[in-house]
Amino acid sequence: MVFVTTTVTGWTPVFTLPETGKVVLEQLKETLTFYGISLVGYALMPTHLHMILGLPKVEELSRFVQTFKSLSSRRVKELEIGAMAEKLNIQGEFRLWKPRFDDVVIFSEKQFRIKLDYIHNNPVKAGLVNRPTDWPFSSASQWFQDNPGLIAIDKQFMWLHE
């Protein structure tokens, strides 16, 4: 498993617009399917995305993230996002995401639980909601209430059995 964080250029809060969040999560779902990667947990915050991924081959991580960021950037660019589009225009080119991303390979169940709790509590800590399950762009309601979310998550760690 790998904990990944990627951030919007200039920490622009582009995902405060519900349509941008939905488009990015739709693209995430498509890219996960294409690469055969499991999504174990996630939270799309106004300025960044946290996710825990189950990868049969960790070597695929960089290519997966690059593909996701490129395709989601194109989709968001097509939306009417007003003044935020100007903040994401760097030297005449639209850049939704910062070029790099952070990743941590998860080696233990304890580390997994810490990262999953961090992801789910991020919207609460940011003052966006009172409970993790109230944030619509998160896997918290799937983990804690078995509600279907915007993207199916893998609570059974199926990538380990492939």
Image: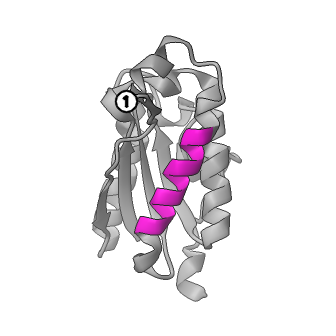
Q: Find the residue positioned furthest to the bottom.
A: 162
Residue at 39% from the left image edge and 46% from the top image edge: 119
Q: Where does the image place residue 35, in percent across and percent down from the top left?
A: 60, 71
Q: Where does the image place residue 116, in percent across and percent down from the top left?
A: 39, 54
Compared with 149, 65 (above or below) is below
Q: Residues within 10 Å of mark 1 (few under 14, many from 20)?
A: few
Residue at 65% from the left image edge and 54% from the top image edge: 29
Compared with 44, 161 (above or below) is below
Reading the image, the residue beneath label 1 is: 90
Q: Find the residue positioned furthest to the top.
A: 83
Magenta-drawn segment: 62-74
Q: Where does the image place residue 125, in percent across and percent down from the top left?
A: 32, 29
Q: Secondary structure at mark 1?
A: strand
Q: What is the quadrant of the N terminus in the image? A: bottom left
Q: Is residue 7 visible?
A: yes
- The quadrant in which residue 38 appears is bottom right
Tell me if 11 is positioned left or right of 148 in this view. Answer: left
Compared with 25, 35 (above or below) is below
- The quadrant in which residue 92 appears is top left
